[in-house]
Amino acid sequence: MATIVGGIGTSHVPAIGAAIAREQQQTPQWKPFFDAYAPAQAWLEAARPDVAVVFYNDHGLNFFLDAMPTFAVGAAAEYRNADEGWGLPVTRPFTGDPELSWRLIEDLVEEEFDITSCQKMLVDHAFTIPMKLLWPNGASVRVVPIAINTVQHPLPSPARCFKLGQAVGRAIERWDGEARVVVIGTGGLSHQLDGSRAGFINKPFDRLCLKEIVEEPRCLTHYSVRELVALAGGQGVELLMWLAMRGAVGEHVARVHTHYQVPISNTAAGLLVIEPDVHGECPAFALGQGEGSSLDQL
Amino acid sequence: MTTLDDLDTPIFDGRAAQLGYPLNAMCFSFNDAGNRARFLHDAEAYFDEFGLSEDQRQAVRERDVLRMIALGGNAYYLLKLANLLGMDVQDIGAQQTGLTRADFQAKLQAQGA
């Protein structure tokens, strides 16, 4: 059985990519932000994941309005980045894990998630920037990107994205082999680019999210998409990716690292590292008597 | 285009997606450097190619972001056009909120305090 070593939530603001391209990581403006990733990098080094499953939202690189999947699972041997039209340098390709991709696709459809499978899939800054932040010297993991639509409403609900994550978690844990898997959700936190409320940031709500996504994620899955847009901003709805990540990591998790900073460009930037908490699980499972993972008990 | 009640927050729904299709298709095409050059060389011909409505053309000519959104422009896709017009997310934010760029940035900073 594969093992989920933990989960990471991180913002993916394009300005971060621009700062990396200009090597501004240690300038006074950027240092606090980039330094906050050192504990996440150290945790990854110790956790030794072989594969990263990454929930992200495409901003018009791979998908357009001609065909807009709600959930799209990458099934490629390699994922390329490409020109997004605003000058970020194109990154090197990422190595896929088709075996895990098809395991996810098969199990998700079996569980009634009608996903789109993609044997070709360009990954945009929402994928590449988190990878660069977490593995600054180049990603040492194979990847499976999963795109969630946040472009065109109706978007999938917070509850649905959490359940998608739970199903992904179950599929990973049923996957044969010894692979160690980290699950990543990118986007957010609160921000809004459009309308006369542009520049909206909601620090109290972000603080609530960073607390409850660890302790009581179902508090956050009760919101409708519209409520989430109202609270987190038009693009703060990207919290959906964090909820999918959280669903995948399992019922009981422990906080490893949190960072929160306002603003990065127009956005409240968040970073969260969590890992499964064996002490928090129910006694039957802790004693090894449970069937499969604790996720089965949900 | 629908907005969220009283918050002036655009919701890019099916109505916006239909109305804004030509404008957003043009923005999507800017992923290609050759297309960006063609737009900068002759924007009017480029509008023809994508079939923008006269209102959409006028909004782009006037760099009026709120108007582009009202005509179905999607926030993410419009960033590709904005970049081509020499505007970043803070310029866009300033324009939509009626603030100077410096005041818009100060507003962002104040929310972190």
Image (tube, rainbow, N blue to C red):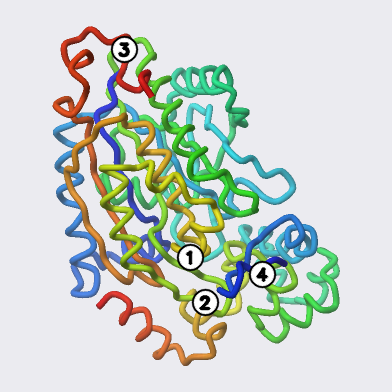
Q: Is residue B11 left or right of residue B92?
A: right
Disc with the residue nearer the chain's start (3 vs 1): 3
Residue A272's x, y, as percent? 26, 48
Q: Nearer the viewer, residue B19 or B40?
A: B19
Q: Secondary structure at mark 1?
A: loop
Would you name the residue on which mark 1 appears?
A233
Q: Amino acid at mark 3?
A: Met
Chain bearing mark 4: B
Ranked by sequence position, the earlier of labels 1 and 2 is 2
Q: Name the amino acid type tagged 2.
A: Arg
Residue A115 lies, in percent from the top left, at 60, 30
Q: Disc 1 vs disc 2: Cβ atoms closer than 8 Å?
A: yes
- Share a chain, discs 3 and 1? yes
Residue ID at (79%, 77%): B57
Q: Residue at x 38, y 34 (%)?
A: A247
Badge 1 local density, few (<14 within 10 Å), some, or many (20+)?
Answer: many
Name the subunit of mark 1: A
Residue under label 3, please give it. A1
Secondary element at tag 4: helix
Q: Label 2: which residue?
A: A197
Amino acid under disc 4: Ala
List x then y, in percent, for residue B11.
63, 63
- Chain letter for the residue marked with disc 3 in the picture: A
Q: Nearer the viewer, residue A159 or A115?
A: A159
What residue sits 66% from the left and 69% below the top? B37
A273 over B24 or under it: above or below: above
In this rendering, the answer to whether A29 lies above or below A295 is below
Q: Residue at x 34, y 45 (%)?
A: A131
| CA distance separating discs 3 and 1 | 39 Å
Q: Based on the displayed image, in which of its 4 quarters is residue A168 positioned?
A: top left
Residue indicated by mark 4: B37
Local packing at callout 4 (Cα closer than 10 Å; few below 14, some 14-19, many 20+) is: few
